[in-house]
Image (tube, helix red, strand yellow):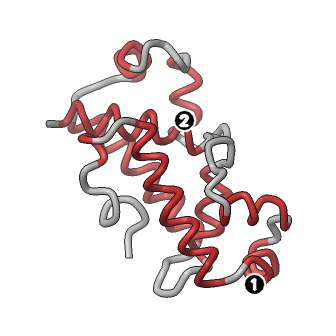
Amino acid sequence: MPMLRGEFPDAGEQSHEELLAAYGTVLTETVETVGVEEIVAETGLDQATVTAFADGDIADRTLDEAVAVLATGPNRPDADALQAEAQDILLMGMTTAVMDVESLASGIDDELEPKEIQQKIEGRYPVTLAEYALLHSYIEGEKR
């Protein structure tokens, strides 16, 4: 089951805050289904991090942490596959919207610098879920 493609088809119609809340719901449900201790054991994440996902406190959590949690869920691909899909959604979205990192930075009111956006989308620098939601929402909104 795709992490974002199948679960957030209306990403471009939501604000980044709404999209972040939707991510939180999926992550909270995963923690509830699998259990904090099991996720800690499977992922190596500390209990405080997993508990933050359980509580929906996800804005400052990273995409790497989120895909590790999601990968523990039933019928989910592994974390590497989820990470690749998440990055692909942004890169392919930018291609479809015919947008470069400079126009993306401008579109999100320069909350992130173009070079920083590129590094985060390519996975060379950690991206928080709040940042991911901001980028995902804007890119999908521009595709319409």
Position above or below: 9 against 43:
above
Badge 1 crowding class, 10 Å Cα cut-off, few under 14, some 14 to 19, many 20 or more, is few
- Label 1 residue SS: helix
Residue 93 or 7: which is nearer the viewer? 7
The circle on residue 131 is 2
Residue 32 or 112: which is nearer the viewer? 32
Tell me what residue is drawn at x 54 percent, y 35 percent: 131
- Residue bearing the label numbered 1: 38
Residue 66 at x, y = what percent? 61, 59
Which residue, as the protein is rendered here, is positioned at the far front? 55
Residue 143 at x, y = what percent? 19, 36
Answer with the quarter of the image where residue 136 lies: top left
Q: Amino acid at mark 2?
A: Glu
Residue 119 at x, y = what percent? 58, 32
The circle on residue 74 is none
- Label 2 residue SS: helix
Badge 2 crowding class, 10 Å Cα cut-off, few under 14, some 14 to 19, many 20 or more, is many
Answer with the quarter of the image where residue 34 lies: bottom right
Tell me what residue is drawn at x 42 percent, y 22 percent: 101
The tally of labels here is: 2
Residue 124 or 75: which is nearer the viewer? 75
Tell me what residue is drawn at x 80 percent, y 75 percent: 40
Position of 109 compared to 44: left or right?
Answer: left
Q: Amino acid at mark 1?
A: Glu
Q: Quadrant of the N terminus?
A: bottom left
Tell me what residue is drawn at x 49 percent, y 58 percent: 84
Residue 61 at x, y = what percent? 68, 48
Position of 73 compared to 62: left or right?
Answer: left
Answer with the quarter of the image where residue 41 lies: bottom right
